[in-house]
Image (cartoon, rainbow, N blue to C red):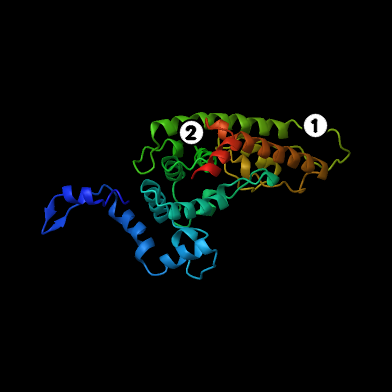
Amino acid sequence: MSGLLSQDRLHQAPVIEARPQIPWDDDPVEFATLLDVFYKQGWVLVLFCMMSFIESARRPLFLVDRPPFREFSSLLRLSTKYQVSSIRDALLDNLRATYTPDPNVGGVTPTHRGHFGDPQPHPNEILKLFHDCRMDFALPFAFYEACVAGIKSLTNTDPSVKLPPVVLSQAVRGFCTLKEWEWKLARSILFLDRQSHASKRCRPLDIRSTDSGSPLQDVLRAIYPGSGIMAGDILHVLDFQNGDHCADCVRRWNIIKQQTKIELWKSLPGIFGMEPWAEIYSKGSRTT
């Protein structure tokens, strides 16, 4: 930012009515959002409160629980570009609350839909933002959410959500690998030995093909009708309830489901061609 308005650049700039004209390649609305942090009443107060850990009743855009994506994106891009570390660090802290995995629960974290407020952004928009701003700790889950939205969404050619070729290539490879994980979990549940228990009230699984294109979703619907899980969203498969199935089957299904979640989360960065979690967080602890 200081280089943008340096004296050397001001002296070399064309002058109109005694005022130097500085070429600006940023979107004016986005840059206005950044300037609001410094000049609007209430924003400076909260920057001070962040540094002194004082809770403020007037919370800025990047500290609210569900920040609007457009403004959040503007602040993240420009604070990264101009190295405004105080704002970028606050944005990172906001994201870590959602995207940092919890190994004690298998890394099941809130989805993007739970992080940003309405109107909801397209998963590709979030993936592009995190990639452009080098948000490595959030990228694996952003890739995952983009893949869960489906191949049509992932390969959307609308200019506002179209992924760059390199990012799309990573995502498509990961999409194919996630399908293998989906088949693995579906098979593990479907072919579980159900003859090892005494209960006779446990009905057989009635697997019917649907238009979801997801074998896992077909199996889940057979176990737990109305579960509402998106096709292939392994990390958010709900716990199974007894219902029409005996407690022993339900217990073993839940063990398989939880083990798969933990294994998938550990493998998630590698699925998308990234370093392991330990390397990602080690790098994140040294730089932002």
Q: Is residue 93 above or below residue 142?
A: below
Binning the other alpha carbons within 10 Å of mark 1 as few (below 14), some (14 to 19) or many (20 upward) gives few
**Comes first in the chain, label 1 or label 2:** 2
Q: Give the structural element (helix, strand or loop) at label 2.
A: helix
Question: Can I make out residue 196 in this image?
Answer: yes
Residue 70 in the image: above or below residue 147: below
Lateral position of residue 163 relative to residue 51, left or right: left
Image location (x, y in percent) of residue 186? 67, 33
- Measuring from the top left, give residue 23's x and y in whole percent: 21, 48
Residue 216 visible in the displayed image: no
Q: Nearer the viewer, residue 108 or 196?
A: 108
Query: Which picture quadrant has residue 164?
Result: top left
Mark 1 or mark 2: which is in front?
2
Identify the secondary structure beneath mark 1.
Answer: loop
Q: CA distance from mark 1 to mark 2?
A: 35 Å
Circle number at residue 171: 2
Label 2 sits on what residue type?
Ala
- Residue for badge 1: 193
Q: Position of residue 188 (x, y in %)?
A: 71, 32
Under mark 1, the amino acid is Asp
Q: Is residue 36 above or below residue 135?
A: below
Residue 136 in picture, x, y percent from top left: 50, 40
Please name the residue shown 48% across and 35% down the image: 151
Q: Residue at x 86, y 34 (%)?
A: 196
In-image side of 69 versus 200 (left or right) = left
Q: Residue furthest front?
A: 7
Residue situated in front as seen by the camera: 274 or 170: 274
Residue at left offset 50%, top offset 58%: 66
Q: Quadrant of residue 39?
A: bottom left
> Image check: 221 left or right of 71?
right
Which of the pair 194/235 is nearer the observer?
Answer: 235
Local crowd size for mark 2, using a 10 Å CA cut-off: few (<14), some (14–19), many (≥20): many
